[in-house]
Image: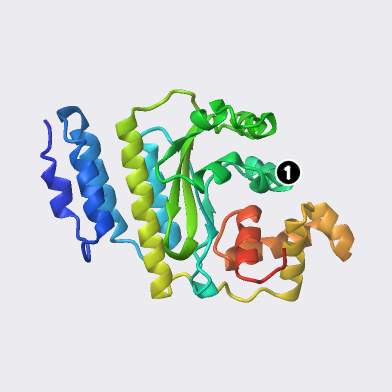
Amino acid sequence: MHHSLSVPIKTVHRPTTNVYEEFSCSRIAKLSGASDNGNVVEFGRYLDQTYDVVQPRKLFDVVVAFAQQFDYSWAAYVPLAYTTSEPLRGAPATMLNYPNEWQKRYRDRGYGKVDPLINKTKHRLGALRWTDVYADANTTESERRIFDEAATFGLRSGITVPLHGPNGSFATVSFAKCTDHEIPGKIITLLELAARHFHLRIDAFGRKGFIGPARSLSAREKECIQWVAKGKSSTDIGVILGISGNTVDFHLKNSMRKLGCGSRTVAVVNALKSGIIDA
């Protein structure tokens, strides 16, 4: 049984209507074919769920759950630039559920500085398929190698959505999966809209002060995070600081808890953004 397109749109409890949401509704209306109504209903449910969430990490879990309906198991939200007037305490944090092994490799190899997805989405408005970037004649072999390596960790294909804000603010949301099977453009449109809505909600959290500074790290916790940022393992850090690797792990776990994240990579990113450690 098919649901009316108007059902999910009318039941969403939106605080206000803005230009972006009107744009979203116009794009959703184009997906009104009978075969797409089920997906549109799910998108409406996703919108409803986001307005019941008051914590950024839980909001990320909601967008991940929506993407998983289309076999995109992995997601990453990465703020890359902020307005000069934006208070640091309001800066959104990086959130991702990529495999830990890939996060470590990406960080250790410094791929963030040469990732073609970052460079190409800076000058783009719509979602970008990873396969298109890979096939682009302007993509170098070293850049393609990043995709090849990611595939070995389970991220075989995906899309990245650029999120441009006022005064030069910029972030991306990426969705990845473990198969090479491409999905229809209409599904990509829904994922793109989901990413943009997620970004708006995160921005609202920042303005309302939900994303505040991390609880202060101890001197030892800062030291450990600083060395992780330089690519050192727990064993290496233990030798440098004259403590055991287990003690290093203890301090890093405390740091991750205080920084509200579940991996060392994200802890480093959040610590850098908060000014807790130096680049």
Look at the picture and state if 94 lies above or below 157.
below
Residue type beneath disc 1 = Arg
Q: Estimate the x, y position of residue 273 in percent, counting from the top left.
A: 60, 66
Q: Quadrant of the N terminus?
A: top left
Q: Estimate the x, y position of residue 198 in percent, counting from the top left.
A: 37, 54
Tell me the residue that label 1 is attached to.
109
Give 271 or 97, whichever is nearer the viewer.
271
Give 33 or 267, whichever is nearer the viewer.
33
Can residue 257 be seen from the camera position used here? yes
Mark 1: secondary structure: loop
Q: Residue at x 24, y 43 (%)?
A: 27
Q: Which residue is drawn at 45% across and 58% down?
A: 57
Q: Residue at x 70, y 68 (%)?
A: 277
Q: Estimate the x, y position of residue 161 in percent, counting from the top left.
A: 44, 44
Left or right: where does residue 240 sit relative to residue 209?
right
Label 1 Cα neighbours within 10 Å, binned few <14 / some 14-19 / many ≥20: few
Please say which color scheme the image uses: rainbow
The part of the image, by quadrant, that contains residue 192 is top left
Give 79 or 234, whichever is nearer the viewer.
79
Left or right: where does residue 74 sit relative to residue 139?
left
The part of the image, by quadrant, that contains residue 33 is top left
Q: Estimate the x, y position of residue 50 in percent, counting from the top left.
A: 31, 56
